Amino acid sequence: MANRLLGVISALPEEFAHLFDQSGQSSDIGGLAFWRGRIAGREAVFVESGAGKVNAGVAATLLLDRFDCRALMLCGVAGGLDPALGVGDIVIGISHIQHDYGTQKEDSFRTIQPGSRPSLGGDWTPGYPLADPLVARLREALTGLALEPLPEAVGVGRRTPSVYYGAILTGDSFVNSESTRRRLYEEFRAHAVEMEGGAVAQVARRWGDDIPVVNVRCLSDLAGAESHLDFRAFLPVAARYASQVAHRLAPAI
């Protein structure tokens, strides 16, 4: 666990800002700046990857190959899919699914595991689940955590966010559609959707089943027709909430 060098990925500068102050040593590789530092007392390498699966995949590959990281954590924001959740809630991904990888038919899309070949009889069930012992450690690390109520300025009422554990979807598009939100939730029963986690999980799997990938996301919007407005307004606050949880989890990964 804590003796593994931890790689920490955020897609956006607003997300990265609450994780690391950029005061450590940096290395520039492939147009990305990798910073040596610590999180919750644990040695780590931090990188702002940029949004999307390719950017996240490049960052994860370099963390694993150049820095020999043997545990990865993503921290940032996501769109909510589960209608029971609200803006500000935290989702810890216990499974990652790339919802936009698969087979397009005339009237439907079948999601499959990236790289799988169903025509040859292989297992194409999508998803990269976390191991049960890791999930148990994450739950234990957050025991007693009490998040502060959302600021009034957020505009969603003074609700107090909660922490949830569930599937997180990944795709190369920002979901700004109520019908798409409903479809994704009905198909996968996932809590959230974002643009990086599933790619990082796929890359980590190439290095072996023992590379944990923990994804911490605060819901900045509800992935519906107004999500573009919610996202811009709440991004800095959501990033701060996610980083608070990430600091609690880092020693347990």
Image: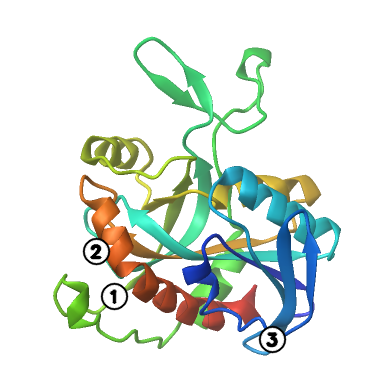
**Position above or below: 21 against 114:** below
Q: Which mark is residue 23?
A: 3
Vertical side of 219 occupied by 248: above or below: below
Give coordinates of residue 194: x percent, y percent: 45, 51
Instruction: Answer yes or no: is residue 222 visible.
Output: no
Task: Name the amino acid type tagged 2.
Answer: Gly
Q: Which residue is mark 1?
A: 161
* Residue corresponding to mark 2: 86
Residue 48 in the image, given as x and y percentages of width and height: 61, 64
Mark 1 or 3, nearer chain start: 3
Residue 16 visible from this viewpoint: yes
Judge depth for marks 2 and 3 and give the one in front.
3
Of all residues, the one furthest to the top in this rendering is: 106
| 216 left or right, relative to 59 | left
Which of these two is toward me, 187 or 134? 187
Secondary structure beneath label 3: loop
Q: CA distance from mark 1 to mark 3?
A: 31 Å
- Measured in 3D between alpha carbons, the distance from the residue under mark 1 to the one under mark 2, in whole angstroms, is 8 Å
Question: What is the CA distance from the residue labelled 2 to the residue labelled 3?
Answer: 34 Å
Q: State if disc 2 and disc 1 touch (CB < 8 Å).
A: yes
